[in-house]
Amino acid sequence: MNGDEISASRRQLSMAEKLDHLLKLRAKPDKDDKPSYKAMAAEIAAQSGETFSGAYLWQLHRGERANPTLRHLGALARYFDVPVSYFTEDDVARRVIDEEDLARRELDKSMTEAGVSAVYLRGDLSALSPEGKRMAADMIRQIRELEQGAKLPPAPPRA
């Protein structure tokens, strides 16, 4: 890693960048393939009891608001299933992002090896948590092994 890469990996992540990562992974797109901030804000509010508006969420995502309250951070963390420290500590955010990336690559590899090419299936699986992605990858590998084992000729009877 050269000096530029080290300084880039150590620069402070903005609230907008952290939220963008979560939205790309877990937000359900609207008709125009963008997250519905209004629907998401309503889900967060219903889940947490905290008041949220679509406009506020949009402003956080765009970087126009950068200092949410601890209550809002807690509600966002619960909704996206990350620790609150994801938003407050860059090292935690980087670990979560790296873990997600590793799990996604593992799932992609197992799907490719199994010949899974259905785009809709890949999209559904990409919304899983890192642990869910690992479980899906393991299941795909096990199914492939079972099917390959079923294609083997039966073993001769033992005497």
Image (tube, rainbow, N blue to C red):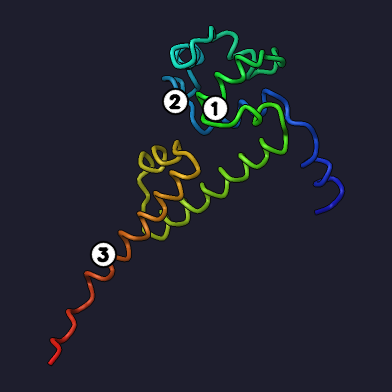
Quickly name the residue at label 3.
147
Q: Amino acid at mark 1?
A: Leu
Q: Taking 124 as reference, is 37 left or right?
A: right
Residue beneath the point at 47% across and 51% down:
108
List x then y, in percent, for residue 153: 19, 79
Quickly name the residue at label 2.
28
Quarter of the image that includes the N terminus: bottom right
Q: Amino acid at mark 3?
A: Glu
Q: CA distance from mark 1 to mark 2?
A: 8 Å
**How packed is label 1: few (under 14 Cα within 10 Å), some, or many (20 or more)?**
some
In the rendered image, which quarter is residue 127 located in? Answer: top left
* Numbered disc 1: secondary structure: helix
Query: Contact (CB < 8 A) between labels 2 and 3?
Result: no
Query: Contact (CB < 8 A) between labels 1 and 3?
Result: no
Quickly name the residue at label 1.
23
List x then y, in percent, for residue 74: 59, 20
- Residue 56: assigned label: none
